[in-house]
Amino acid sequence: MEIPLGAGTIDPAVPDCPTTVADPPGGEPVDVREAAQRALEDPLGAPLSTRVDPDDDVTIVVTDVTRKAPDDILLDVLLERLAACGIEREQVTVVIGLGLHRPMTDDEIEAMLGPHADLAANHDPESVVVVGTVADGEVPVEIGEPVADADTVLSTGVVEPHQYAGFSGGAKTVVIGAGGESLIRYTHGPEMLAREGVRLGRVEGNPFRETLDAAGDLAGLDFSVNLTHGPAGVLGVRAGDGRRVVRELAAIARDALSVPIDREFDAVVCGVGAPKDANLYQATRGATYVALGDRNPLREGGRLVVPAALPEGVGDGTGEQRFYRRLSGANDAETLYRAMREGYEPGAQRAFVVARVLREHDLYITNSEAPTVVEDCLMHAEADVADALESGSEVLVVPDALNTLLVDPDT
């Protein structure tokens, strides 16, 4: 039995703990380039050739280092199709959708985009323009200038389980990744996150997703090329209208990633791995995806264990630092949760969600390079998984916690 840690794996087996492994079906992998080419040839909605003119300036928003996606291949196929539409390379700008994450380094951009790295620049959340409003006119939608100024806006992305949007991808890559704080503040605020339908794995009837899609219309998103993946690899690629792309890929992902859970456990070991376990902000997703998903598999008082390398500590981005300040400045999870119910700055929402989980469950981070940071944030640091488990505990191991949907067997 192996689970990811950084770019490698570890064996989390503990001999004196009865263990169950949550392995999703996985689905059938596809060749990414071939699947992307087919998706562009048979898009969901009007073809790309009808959405772009040869004299257009085109901006393509791609995901950042926190997403595990072959953006180089998706971008390569998309640029080939644009060239066939009469768009020269010099007319294309690639924006890396950071949201409030840290900027990517030149080396990271080159590793991610290969020969197309020269087209790319990090999104600047300080250089945005208002393109409209959502929430009955109360929330401005701010978009980075390279996106707002483009004649045609395209995006790549990953449709994977997301704590709030149900699944990521589609308009989210643009309006959050290349947007400003106003929309992030609204969509990630306590009022939105408490609304019915805002939950992992749900797209239909999800107010968070609906708001992103409305903002995407205002931002002028014309065409998306997204993929979904599972343990077996990339499971599908779709292109075209963002809403339809997300819904089709979410259905593929749901079939491939769902694991019915019919009983409760004393502890859950949540695998994360690179790139998500680079910092504590991202790595805690493993725990919150498990505890706040469709089916929490833990008994009352059960604990969550996340092996995470944490070479970046808590993380260097604006959101990561706000997350750290909230958690490290709190005396206990319940008090922090109640205080944050009154509001918080964009980026701190992960502290709010983590505090929500910590009210019910202890969270152990093991195998990390930053145990002091972990202890500062109301969590427990241990050297390895065995140290975080009590002898005789019934343990559920979720090797890929970010791409596994634990569900009730009756749904």
Image (cartoon, rainbow, N blue to C red):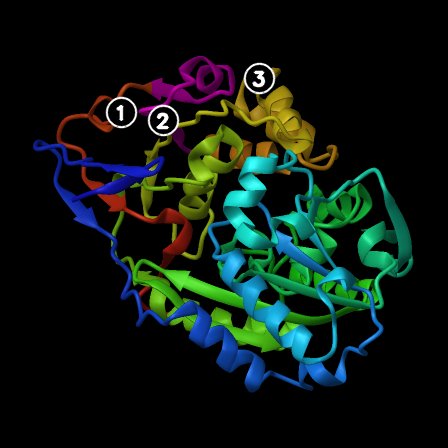
Relative to 411, 65 lies left or right: right
User: What residue range appears in magenta?
Assistant: 359-381
Residue at figure coordinates x 73%, y 33% from the top left: 344
Mark 2, Cα crowd under 10 Å, few <14 / some 14-19 / many 20+, is: many
Residue that carries the numbered disc 3 in the rendered image:
328
Q: Are marks 3 and 2 in contact (CB under 8 Å)?
A: no
Sequence order check, earlier mark of 1 and 3: 3
- Measure the alpha-carbon separation of dots 1 and 3: 21 Å
Residue type (three-letter) at the residue carrying disc 1? Ala
Q: Are marks 1 and 2 in contact (CB under 8 Å)?
A: yes
Residue 388's place in the image compared with 19, above or below, is above
User: Residue 112 in the image: x percent, y percent?
Assistant: 52, 48
Residue that carries the numbered disc 1 in the rendered image:
388
Q: Quadrant of the N terminus?
A: top left
Q: Can residue 223 be found in the magenta stretch?
A: no
Q: Give whichever of 322, 89 is nearer the camera.
A: 89
